[in-house]
Amino acid sequence: MTVASPLDRYFAALDAGDVAATTAAFADDALYIRPSLEKPGTLEIALGHEELLESFVARGKRPFRHEVRACAVDGRDTFVEGVATMDGDELNSFLVHAVIDEEGLIRRYFALMSEVASPTAS
């Protein structure tokens, strides 16, 4: 089941490959931290719109989609748990802590991610 979250605009733009709309979901001086898809075990860090734009252009459109499964909001803090899916299969699970500013823009975004374990046959 997918639930609504303050990050829906960001995830929709990211999944559509719309770099301008993805960047526009962030405050001008936003800090963005996420696991690298190219270098597992490392983090990608971007600060501000220019670095965010470069990061999203380099990332490109990916074949998977983000689905939010749980969301908790406490003031400006948003916590989101979700999965990246492709063709109905869950590929990765993720956990995000984001700080949303007064205008609804993401000021700080920190994500952790892990591959979803395959069910084992018994």
Image (spheres, grey):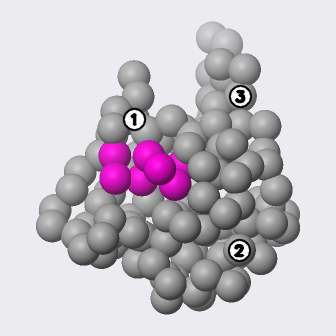
Whether residue 114 appears in this view of the structure is no
Closer to us: 22 or 34: 22
Whether residue 43 appears in this view of the structure is yes
Residue identified by numbered label 1: 69
Confirm or deny contact between disc 1 and disc 3 (CB under 8 A): no
Quadrant of image for the C terminus = top right
Q: Position of residue 54 (x, y in %)?
A: 77, 77
Q: Position of residue 60 (x, y in %)?
A: 82, 56
Q: Earlier in the sequence, mark 1 or mark 2?
A: 2
- Give the label, 2 or 3, closer to the camera: 2
- Circle number at residue 86: 3
Q: Earlier in the sequence, mark 2 or mark 3?
A: 2
- Give amino acid for label 3: Met
Residue identified by numbered label 2: 53
Q: Position of residue 84 (x, y in %)?
A: 61, 39
* Residue 9 inside the magenta-drawn segment: yes
- Give amino acid for label 1: Arg
Q: Is residue 96 above or below residue 88?
A: below
